[in-house]
Image: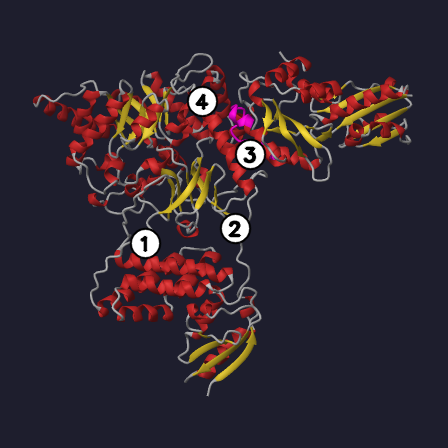
Amino acid sequence: MALEYNFVCPLKNGIHARPATALELIATKYRSDVLLQNERNSRIANVKSVLSMISADFKPNDDCRLIVRGNDDQAAYDAVVSYLKKGFAESDKELPQVEPEAGEVLIPPSLKLQQGDYCTGTVVVKGLAAGKAVVLNNVFTADIPSACLGKDEELVKFKKAVDSLKCKIADRMTNKANSTERKILEAHLSIASDPELAEKVAELINGGSDAGNAILAASGYFANLLKSAESELIQQRIYDIQDISAGLIEEIYGIVQKKNTLAEPCICVAQNLTPNQFLNLDKRFIKGLILAHGGSTSHTIILARSFGIPTIVGIERAQIIIRNGQDIVLDANLGVVVLRQSESVKRYYLFEQKKLNNRKERFTGFVKAQAMTADGRIIEVAANIASSQEAEIVFGNGAQGIGLFRTEMLYMQNDSVPSETEQFDIYKKVAVAAEQRPVIIRTLDIGGDKNLSCLNLESEANPFLGYRAVRIYPEYENIIADQFRAIIRASAFGSVKMLVPMVCSVDEIRWVKQKVKDIQKELTEHNVNFDNKMSIGIMIEVPSTIFILDQLCDESDFFSIGTNDLAQYIFAVDRENKKIAKLSDNLQPAFLRVLKTIVQQIHARGKWVGMCGEMAGQIETLPLLVGLGLDEISLGSDNIPAVKAAIHSLSYEKCKDIFESASRCISADEVRNLLAADQNTQDFAIIDRDLIITNSDSLNKEEAVKEAVDLLFVAGRTEKPEFIEREVWNREAVYSTSLGYGFAIPHCKSAFAKANSICLMKFKDGIRWNPKEEDCVKIVIMLVVKQDDTAGTHMQVFSKLARKIMHSDFRDFLLMNDDASVILKFLKESLEIK
Amino acid sequence: MKFVAITACPTGVAHTYMAAEQLSKTAKKLGHEIKVETQGAMGIENELTDKDIASADAAILAVDIMIEKEERFDTIPKIRASVQEAIKNPEAVFARQAKK
């Protein structure tokens, strides 16, 4: 005789994974059968199986019948019913929004995206790409080795995989304090242990399938069942099941190293990509990259950065959310992946692409130029690379040398040690491509977080403070000698220099120099050419070096500051730890003072010092780097023309003052404010030809405002047009800036404006500024004032303009003329601008 | 009639001056005398002296924000208006009844 209990489903999203998990946790304690019947569709679910309950598609208000049958039926019944009466209805409290670790993604008003049409992530390499998505490493299209070892063996494989995966999930659960994530992992755990899943897989294995294909087929079976469920939450469970299946297959077969080949330009999407897999892709076809996982300094991302490939990471399950072949937009400026584009979104990205092209064009004049300040100081601008393929690209972008050739990629590519010959060919290629320009090759920096299993390095508790780089050279003498020999031989073909990482004392650099001498002697005996004046330098990243620069200057020919690691050691921060990553801020006054003492001491002894960390590539901090007096900065080559242009407008003397003031600030934020306030405007007139458009295509207010702020961006008057855009809208919210007479004058004050500016736009067809207004706006004049500039003569120009607009003859002239040069002349005269 | 006026808008960049210009223009058209002080991003310009105020019939305060030295107008009839009104409908502003 069965015990029964009728109730109505109280859950507003039906019975999906989370409430099902709660029920299952109770039911599995008992030996009786515990079933739940859905009166609406007559399906009967096994309460001990989450999948079974989900598949029965319980919707809100469905009539449900609990049926308990067995030896301990009373106990089971009491437990389940008690929960159904108290607690079940609350089991579906809204999951609090999981804090996006990406930081706030600012979506401008001109980009009208609907919920569900996009997802957000963290930008690690800036840029914009549109095209077809290609999902890589797709377990579901991979070729699983189908050597079937017999039913029993395959079953055992499956069971072992389940146990192992469950342990891993349990481990992840103990490390997560966040209750939301715990709940999700709990749901995963229950799917992994679900008896229905196990039964289905066993059934398929008994039918002759191997474990891998059985898992895939079972996953497909449940996915189909769930697809028909009408609740979106239940459909999300398909992702969970796919995750678990992929996990189980990995347990059995290891990471599926499917060779990914690209046939045409596309945006690559993957959960993860090893450096090897990245390097094996045809770079010509990668327009953009989306990874579910990957910290900003992971090696794949360092490679993507050096190839200038726009990249976003941190989109959970990107490889499942984004379908193979889907047309998407990768906006690695905002941090958004657009999955579905409405007409207005398409137009937005047309404008975006135009803006980026225009901006790039503006800097092409600087590609071949020297990087010289307005008062004549020269600084060398070089590029960081990790492979020989990048060499041609970087010189095309105006790199004046290679400031850092990271050689560990050559080893990590195939997780094997490249031979001397292989390396020699690569170094020679780069030296030749560089012609007379310097090429700084950094010797092997492996160990720590950059591991090479072929070296059999032991895993360490503190890899950043561990056995790595120059420290391992004596033990791996032969491998190092091969690399040294390759570099020394390559020095015969160009201006090659050797750079040693992680040096902390004089002994280490002496060891290296002795080794180099020995090899040079050997090569001389064999009549092999090399540059016997080849420079050997050291990276400054270990803090101890700062205190023995006098001694190191006697041993080392040059120095390169590795700001990434140096900052980590100085602030005692692991930059992969999101909780504290912010503390390791390059703009902290403490760090600026460290840089100052390094450069001062090295220059006092007449030696050369460059910078090759990420700090070297940030345009906003250039005044500090110039003021510091560095001989060279080395960065991702994409940015080189813009950096040279920025240096062109700086004054070295002023930058020195800025640096002094910055080192006296109390915080990184204070330094940032200082930099923002000191933006040099000597090159910018208040209005110029490139701020006037007489045939705008904008259709509405949002597009018009965006187009206007983009003019400022293209002209180099701001690095953050979206922030100025926001401030214009804030002002509009106070009250509308349309004046009638067909004019509107949006305006704002902004810390992100480098110069007071007037933009003027005329529309082909008038646009409606406000929904209620009849008048359409034919001319927009946007005024942007630098944050603290209230006393300058520019303000008087603005007030003159404001007064003039009230006069019809002024307005009529602007309305009647479409020639931008004529308008510019008229404005300059009317506003008395020189 | 003789008027004094103050204009002051939130950002102090544009509307302050547009309103000032509009009031001046309109006063002239209606046959009045006017002196307009602006309080904008550049601070106070064309400041009204006690003499200016004493000899005026009324003060127009076309302001959207708190203004400086409002005490000056304690003894004179005032017309209050928003900056928008001064720009879009100046004649109506002049036609308003001034109140102490």
Can residue A595 be seen in this snapshot? yes
Q: Quadrant of residue A347?
A: top right
- x 34%, y 26%: residue: A394
First-in-chain label (3 vs 2): 2
Establish if A518 lies above or below A155. Answer: above
- The one of A398 and A102 positioned closer to us in this rendering: A398
- Would residue A503 be found to the left or right of residue A579 on screen? left
Q: Tell me the amino acid under the disc marked 1.
A: Thr
First-in-chain label (2 vs 4): 2
Q: Secondary structure at mark 1?
A: helix
Determine the CA span between mark 3 and mark 4: 21 Å
Determine the CA span between mark 3 and mark 2: 22 Å
- Furthest-bottom residue in view? A1
Mark seen at residue A363: 4
**Magenta segment range?**
A711-726
Residue carrying label 1: A141
First-in-chain label (4 vs 1): 1
Residue carrying label 2: A116
Q: Are marks 3 and 2 on the same chain?
A: yes
Q: Nearer the viewer, mark 3 or mark 4?
A: 4
Q: Secondary structure at mark 3?
A: helix
Residue carrying label 3: A722
- Parent chain of label 2: A
Q: Tell me the amino acid under the disc marked 3.
A: Glu
